[in-house]
Every structure is written in structure tokens, then in C-alpha cells.
Amino acid sequence: STFTVVLTCCGVGPLRTHSTPLPNSCTFVVGDAGAMDCVASGTPTALAVAILGDVERMLTQAHLVEQRATGATPARTVLRIGASETFAIRLLPDILAELAREREDPQVTVTVDLSTRLERMLLDHAVDIAFLADPRVSGRIRIVPLWTVEYVWVVARSLELKQEVVTPEMLANLAIFTNDLPSPLHTTLLFWFGLRGVVPRRINTCNTLPVIARLAGAGTGAALIPREIVD
């Protein structure tokens, strides 16, 4: 037997791609026919965005199940991997290469995101394994320490900071670039300044570490970056 999950939005029909506009505020209702209807009102909300993402993942999985049930594709286990950006850039390629040597034609999906979001995805069974920083202990997951992340400050030469070792007082008046909260990097940065009772004047956020490093290197400020990103 097969099943179909349909998401209709404001009478515009099924949502099949990410390009479909998100309604202002969504309420999803499962009807008698198993269809999910969306009612819009007000302004866009974070909850609406999150729900739409969950539903799109459900549709993808439903499509794979239907294909397998009809024999359209061979049954295959998909390994769902989540990885922080540092891990994904420096170590994940080697891990996937090793996986390919041990298993014939492995199929994987990779999600690169902040560690805190990946941890939630792991607890929600949205990924099977996650490579992340500072995981919280939980009876629902197994934690295996793999490596230690070393952070360094990236500051443009044009700012003429000649010291090899910087202090919070030296950087407090510079624009600081980092990931948004609640990322471990942002938390570590605030902790480092807080140890000396210093509050940085301006914190700018960006969601990708290589761009953060380039912004700091261009002379617009400073950035605390994993050493693996700049080596």
C-alpha cells in the first residue's frame, strides 16, 4: 500500500519546492483525508518557518518510502549526518571517504548547522549522527569525544595590533564578528571577555565561519575562529 502527504497553503495547491512563499502565520490542520491545510494571518513567525521545514522533510521521506514500496528505487539505508561547520570543512570529507571504502555505494545526507541546532535535530531523530561542539549529556544519545577545538583571534594587519597575544581590553572597542547565539563560539567569546569584566562595544553576527574570518581579515574588526578554519 502507499500513502500521500499533501500540504496545501492558502488555496494555492501543494507546496513542493523551497521557492514557494511562506505564509504570514501558519496553522497546520490534519483533516479527515490526511491532508495538511495551512491558514495564514498576521506576520511571519519563527514557528511557522520551523513547521514548514519539518513538513518538507516529512514529504521527502514520504516520497522515498513510496518509491521503495513501488519498487522505483532499491531499498537503501540513508545515513543522516549533522556536522558543525568546522568539522564539515576539515574532517567530514575524510570520514566520508573512509565510509565509501568500507561500504559499497553509501548514501548519506549532510546537514551543516550550529551545534545547538544539530543537538536538537539529533534528539528529534532528524539526524542519525552529529559532529558538534559542547554537547549536553542526555540519556537519549551516546557521546564520544573526538577532538579538541583550538580558537584563535583573527585581526587584520591594518589594525596594527603588534602583540602576539591579545587581551579583552585590547579588542573591546573593535567590531567583533561571530556566530549568533546560542552557538558555542558566541558563548565562548562572551566568556573570554567576561573573565576580565569587559563587554565588547559591538558584536556583529554571521552564519558562516569562512566569511567571518574574511570580514575580520579585511580590517573591519576581529573574530574568534577555530584554528582549522584559518590554517
Image (tube, rainbow, N blue to C red):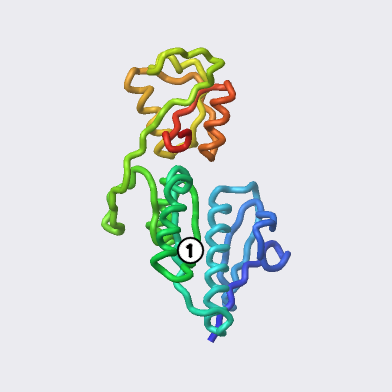
Q: Quadrant of residue 206?
A: top right
Number of callouts: 1
Q: Nearer the viewer, residue 156 or 132?
A: 156
Question: Residue at horizontal 57%, vertical 21%?
Answer: 219
Residue 80 on image: x %, y %: 45, 62
Question: Residue at horizontal 58%, vertical 81%?
Answer: 72
Identified by mark 1, the residue type is Val
Residue 155 on image: x %, y %: 50, 22
Q: Residues within 10 Å of mark 1 (few under 14, many from 20)?
A: few
Determine whether the residue tagged by mark 1 lies in a helix, strand or loop: strand
The residue carrying mark 1 is 108
Q: Is residue 142 above or below residue 30?
A: above
Taking the view exactly as shown, the residue that stands out farthest to the right is: 12
Q: Quadrant of residue 193?
A: top left
Question: Residue at horizontal 54%, vertical 33%?
Answer: 212
Q: Is residue 154 above or below residue 49?
A: above
Q: Nearer the viewer, residue 65 or 72?
A: 72
Residue 64 on image: x %, y %: 54, 73
Q: Is residue 112 above or below residue 225?
A: below
